[in-house]
Image: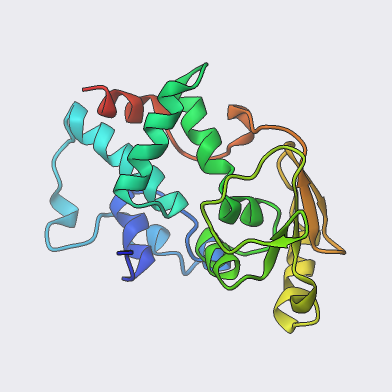
């Protein structure tokens, strides 16, 4: 499957905000968005004011890049969200938040969503005791996510245990940082999703 493999800091600069794609670097003074506040490219410093469509498009691209989702897959999430009861924008974010790679990141078991995706693909995590290596797997309420027993002794996961111990998970997750496992105790609400997104613009874009 095609996936962007270029410099991810360029994506943050293009959207004009931190997307937290490089873990600790995003919180340091090395962050590209803080050092160069303009968009990348030859004309990055002279971009004109965006139209209504441009604002909607940028918001969709921002959401895609935060969660690491390709265009067709993102559209499928929107179609599914639109068919569900409730507010479409909230439904969309709820589906994206329940991706296994995002849940692993939210629990503090990875420093970024790209790292969480890689760890999941390498079969380092289990769901209810069974190995799952599909980053887009939709985690359900009551399911337990844990580091696979064979990975617990590695230095990487010892570091992750320390990382998770100092991170406060959202209210819809319950985390046992010492044993590197956690559980989904509820569906995420909009106030639990601390992202710089205006999801109504995405709904407006796909409703044109």
Residue 57 or 42: which is nearer the viewer? 57
Work out whether 176 lies above or below 85: below
Q: For the view shown, which residue lies furthest in the top direction?
A: 86
Q: Residue at point 82% right, 60% down?
A: 177
Q: Residue 80's image quarter? A: top left
Residue at image point 47% right, 61% down: 21
Count of numbered circles in the view:
0
Estimate the x, y position of residue 126 in percent, counting from the top left: 71, 61
Residue 39, given in percent of the width and then of the height, sits at 25, 55
Quarter holding the C terminus is top left
Q: Is residue 68 above or below residue 154?
A: above
Work out whether residue 58 or residue 207 is closer to the camera in this orientation and state it.
Answer: 207
Where in the figure is residue 30, as x and y percent of width and height? 47, 69
Q: Name the quarter where the N terminus is drawn.
A: bottom left
Looking at the image, which residue is at 15% across and 47% down? 47
Q: Position of residue 142 (x, y in %)?
A: 77, 40
**Foreground residue among 31 and 169:** 169
Q: Is residue 184 left or right of residue 192?
A: right
Depth check, front residue: 10 or 73 = 73
Using the rendered image of the protein, determine whether residue 28 is visible from the camera's viewpoint: no
Q: Quick check: can you spot residue 108? A: yes
Check the image and name the residue furthest to the front.
Answer: 130
In this rendering, position of residue 130 left or right of residue 45: right
The figure's colour scheme reads rainbow
Q: Is residue 176 left or right of residue 147?
A: right
Residue drawn 61% across the image and 64% down it: 111
């Amino acid at each position: 499957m095609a996936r962007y493999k270029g410099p991810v800091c360029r994506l943050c600069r293009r959207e004009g905000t931190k997307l937290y794609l490089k873990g600790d670097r995003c919180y340091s003074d090395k962050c590209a968005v803080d050092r160069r506040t303009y968009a990348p490219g030859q004309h990055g410093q002279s971009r004109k004011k965006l139209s209504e469509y441009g604002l909607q498009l940028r918001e969709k691209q921002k959401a895609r890049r935060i969660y690491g989702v390709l265009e067709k897959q993102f559209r499928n999430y929107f179609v599914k969200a639109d068919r569900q009861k409730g507010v479409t924008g909230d439904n969309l974010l709820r589906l994206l938040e329940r991706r296994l790679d995002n849940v692993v990141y939210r629990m503090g078991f990875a420093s970024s969503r790209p790292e969480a995706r890689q760890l999941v693909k390498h079969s380092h995590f289990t769901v209810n005791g069974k190995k799952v290596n599909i980053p887009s797997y939709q985690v359900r309420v009551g399911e337990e996510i844990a580091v696979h027993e064979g990975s617990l002794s590695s230095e990487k996961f010892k570091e992750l245990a320390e990382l998770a111990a100092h991170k406060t998970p959202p209210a819809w997750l319950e985390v046992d940082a010492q044993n590197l496992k956690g559980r989904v105790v509820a569906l995420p609400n909009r106030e639990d999703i601390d992202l710089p997104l205006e999801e109504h613009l995405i709904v407006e874009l796909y409703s044109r």
